[in-house]
Image (spheres, rainbow, N blue to C red):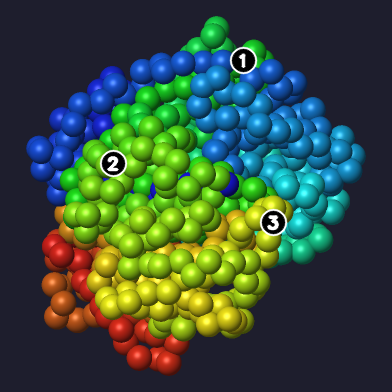
Amino acid sequence: MKKVILFSLCLVVLIGLATVSGSWAAEYANFTDYLRAEHSISQGDIAPASFGSAIGSFASGVAGAIGLTYDPARRGVWIIAESGQIVLKAATLPYATIRAVSLVGVAIAPDGNSDGGDVLPNGNLILADYQGDGGTTINDYLFEVDPDTSTLVNYWPVDGSFNTSTDGTNIDLVIDVKMGPNGHAYVTTAGNNNIYEIELQPGLPGTWRTVAVHTPSSTTNVISLQRANCPYDGWWLADYLSTTVHFVDNEFRSLFSFNSTHNASTFNSGITVMSGTDPMQVWVIDYITGFVGIFDTGQYSISPGKGCLNVLYWSDFTLGKSDYMAQALSALSPTHAVTTAVSNADFEQKIVSGGWDLVIAAFQNFGPAGYSLTNFSDYLSNGGSTIYCDWTKNNTYGAMFDVTYSGNQNQSSMNVTNALLKPGITNPFDLVNPGWISTFSMGMSTTTPGQVAATFPNGDAAIIIGSSGKTIANGFLTDTTGPEGVQLFKNEILALTVKKVSLLTPNGGERLPSGSTYSIRWNAPANAAKFNLKYTLNNGVTWTKIAKGITTNSYSWTVPTVAADKKKAKIKITAIDKNGVAVGSDVSDLNFTVLKP
């Protein structure tokens, strides 16, 4: 069965051997000074790193390999290829093939080819299909597939005679597509240096429209990209012609770069970032040689209180097609940085390092008694926040969560009653056995101070909040909830990590150019249904509406144009529950500056 632990890591990109460029270079001597000034990071927060250092490489062994994307829920990296297949490789040595999925008869084009892609919050893949002809005759596509069932879910012609753009845009020679925190798709091509930001409407085919076209100044032909979040968000870019990797901000201004040559490579064709690994890795692939190069990003954890929540996650096995807990963590990635342990020893080593806002442990193969868990027990004894499940129903460990197992098992539904866990949940909440031969749900009971948060039809507790609100014990496994479990697990994570509305960015010290696009981000408890945003340029004397009724935890703000630098700017976020009642608000801690054109 399995174990899961979640770890959220506040990350910053460092200096080291970086080649510094971008709009801040004229103002600051180095990237360290930039971080201190723009993000209020003190000297003690900045640690040395081997930025851009080669960690390793391996031959992909995949014919026509072009693209990469990291899939933490499946514990691997998808290699996307023009050979009618996608291949999932293990994210750790020896980088073995986990599985290969044929797209022949699934992709829109008969050859089943694809070139780049990303993992969606629902666990499906969005892929780009290069059919380019340098014109508008042959169709290029984006398409969504379920890799577990080899099913086509949605597709979008972005070029050619079947183009479904609602604004007349053609995107030819498509190579990569990655999703941004705003839900937009970002598309690169082999034909120019543009990144097309587009909004997709589902369908077979679906329609799409262009939101913006970004042209990074530091690249010659950006061919692949990958989003980085929390708290210094931006994009990793692979430059096709120069074998150079760049990290850029949300306006696609370069902050630093490194040379990614490896194994006599001459081209970059795909890039992905191994969020939550230590060291945090950038993988690039050369489609000529088929080799994957692995590099140190120079990203590292910073001290608590910088706006990013650290989660450690361990699941010792997942039988079902989807780990819905991992999907919930992926959906919260703009605000929760996740480290996934790969073994009991790795879990024990990571947990003792400290700094975790939440640990998630799913014992779904062996029970806790089958592992050495000294450090985990110490973490619990010291009041650490934890989400937990145990298919073996071990009462010794259950007592740490105010849980006694009843011995009853395999209930197929539950009723969620706790107000913090109910948002977005429909009762009865179904549980589905993905194929476990023995146990997939476990009845529980509790005594004070434990609280029953959900019940099975037989009256047993299905979820217990224990340890005075610091732990959640689930009487079911992470692959038995069905897709609705993503929302339930998000609610659980937020219940233990987010107690109030908290504005993350901008939080003071930033310098935002007039007319630029900036990602406003915030945390909020699960009962917050919608959000209203305002800004001030005069330290709160007057406020101007940005948007109302936002349903996500981020917003792409077009910074107002000002005639003179405004140094007293702030953002205000207000959260509203489903009944229209305000449940909290927050304002930037310090002023930021809006720069004149």
From the viewer's side, name the closer residue of 500 and 567.
500
Residue 210, position as x, y percentages in the image = 61, 57
N-term mark: 2 or 1: 1
Q: Is residue 349 left or right of residue 64?
A: left
Determine which residue is flagged by label 3.
Answer: 434
Q: Earlier in the sequence, mark 1 or mark 3?
A: 1
Q: Nearer the viewer, mark 1 or mark 3?
A: 3
Residue 515 seen by the camera = no
Task: Point out the image quarter for the C terminus.
Answer: bottom left
x and y, in percent, of residue 222 in the image: 54, 33
Total numbered circles: 3
- Residue 108: x, y in percent? 84, 46
Query: Where 14 sits versus 420, above or below?
Result: above
The local secondary structure at tag 3 comes to loop
Label 3 neighbourhood size at 10 Å, few (<14), some (14-19), many (20+)? some
In the figure, is residue 56 to the left or right of 106?
left
Q: In 3D space, how far apart are the residues under numbered discs 2 and 1 (Cα atoms)?
A: 39 Å
Q: CA distance from mark 1 to mark 3?
A: 34 Å
Q: Which mark is residue 374?
A: 2
Give the Cα separation between the discs numbered 2 and 3: 31 Å
Q: Residue at x 51, y 54 (%)?
A: 392
The three-letter code of the residue at mark 1 reads Ala
Write down the residue under mark 1: 59
Q: Is residue 181 left or right of residue 468?
A: right
Q: Amino acid at mark 3?
A: Pro
The answer to whether residue 363 of the structure is visible from this angle is yes
Q: Is residue 308 above or below residue 530?
A: above
Q: Secondary structure at mark 2?
A: helix
